[in-house]
Amino acid sequence: MSGNDMRKENEQLNLLPREGIDWSRVEPMRRVWLEDIGGDHRARLEFLADQGLRLVMADLGPGEGETLHFFNPRDRETLHLRAGGGKSLLSEAARYFPSVSRWTELLQGEEKSSQEERGSAALPTRSGILFEVEGGRVLRVHESWRDYPQVVLYGTKTGQAGSFLEKEAGTEGTALAIVFVQALEDARGMKVPTTALALRTVLIESARAQGHLAWIGAAAAVLQRQRIAAKSDSLRRELEEGLEEWLGDPLGRGWAIPGGMKEGFPLEGATACVEKLGAAAAKWEELSPRVKSLPVPRWTEKRLHRLPGEAEASGWVGPLARAAGLDVDVRKEEPGVYPVVAWEGTDAPEGAGMFRRLLALKAGEVASSLEVARRILEDLPDDPLLVKRGRGGRGEGFGRCEGPEGETCCHVALEKGQISYVAFSLPRELNRSAARVLEGRLLDEADILSLLWENPPTPITG
């Protein structure tokens, strides 16, 4: 890493305010719902595309037909569209929104080849991907399952559901739980206190730092840099221990609930956590340049050089999308805490290969996550942690945040106070289409190439 790059990263971190945060500037997330719409759907969708709206999620409910969820960059709000009479909007939207093809795959399933077509090919699996392998070479890849985190919510009370999600999904569980409670709050018309919004941001950024450190440790190990892997893992464990000492859990699970944060949240322990975050940031500042200069094999970048062209049509999100050149990040798009703390995104090095860019992005995000979390805890707003009732809710809501691996969304519908419908948009599902890069390659190459879509990487079985 050059001296100019290091100075640039430090300058970005130094943009964070040092004279107190003006928490009065935090704005609520804005949602616009249009259901049972009639008329010329094609013209309406074409207009939305011309206005620069981006499709962020599609799902099959509630009721008949799909609901399409868009981000509107002009008004910094999300738009939620559903046709009347159960009419499908997805097929019409395919004309104007490239990522519809990926959502169609996820909602309807890709075309499966028959066993006769596969012949004698072996069928190992890895992280939701089934590989057709013959002679040690990958012939085709298939998505062997979809993730349905909502199944753990059946039969649970809404106040307990978030903790179930957190337990099921590791570092991504924090984002899942938060978008779920956001959707419930939207459905009930609840205005969440600023202190709760700030603390949720701390939890997400802590999870991001831990998740990226786990990924970096795995990448360093695959690239035969065991010392860097060990130091990354050691720092991750330090962060886990610091959060567990403060919140009773390494990811702060169980504290985020509908309306804010659970009563009894240990605000008095924030000072000690600030010190630990500062110590971790100092260690990472020393290690980060070595991570960014990890020796990436030339063949790896050669395999990946065409992938960026597939990013938009595949609907990729998070660091993978940004490494491919897409400017997608909920922290930039949504109003809320991030603009108030003057957060700045991490830039990927120009001219670098895709894997190198991904390394740099995740390394930079570890630094910014630690700094944002520390800065918030140093200057928390002074208002309640929880509201228990809302006003003007429509019984349907949407939640959205930038989780560790990318944009995470939740769509909820309530009936008589109970959950009647819930769906999620998961980064690991959207990004998993990158596994197609393995087609025609040796299976042994999966250890490195699978780092694109997996966090943390998992072994092949079968």
Image (cartoon, rainbow, N blue to C red):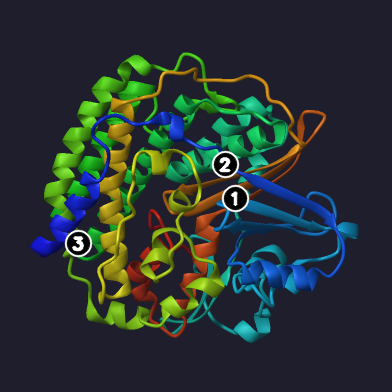
The 10 Å Cα crowd at callout 3, few under 14, some 14 to 19, many 20 or more, is many
For label 2, the SS is loop
Name the residue carrying label 3.
292
Q: Is residue 241 left or right of residue 40?
A: left
The 10 Å Cα crowd at callout 2, few under 14, some 14 to 19, many 20 or more, is some
CA separation, marks 1 and 3? Answer: 35 Å
Name the residue carrying label 2.
29
Name the residue carrying label 1.
77
Q: Is residue 252 visible?
A: no
**Residue 454 occupies which quadrant of the picture?**
bottom left
The relative height of residue 430 versus residue 149 in the rendered view (above or below) is below
In the depicted view, which residue is nearer to us: 430 or 309? 309
In the depicted view, which residue is nearer to us: 338 or 352? 338
In the depicted view, which residue is nearer to us: 370 or 457? 370
Amino acid identity at mark 3: Lys
Amino acid identity at mark 1: Glu
Pointer 2 with pointer 3, Cβ within 8 A: no
Amino acid identity at mark 2: Met
Pointer 1 with pointer 2, Cβ within 8 A: yes
The relative height of residue 192 versus residue 285 in the rendered view (above or below) is above
Q: Where is residue 299 in the image (x, y as percent from the top left)?
A: 27, 82
CA separation, marks 2 and 3? Answer: 35 Å
Nearer-N-terminus badge (1/2): 2
Q: In this view, does 30 lie to the left or right of 26?
A: right
The structure residue drawn at horizontal position 70% and vertical position 73%, both measured from the top left corner, is 46
The 10 Å Cα crowd at callout 1, few under 14, some 14 to 19, many 20 or more, is some
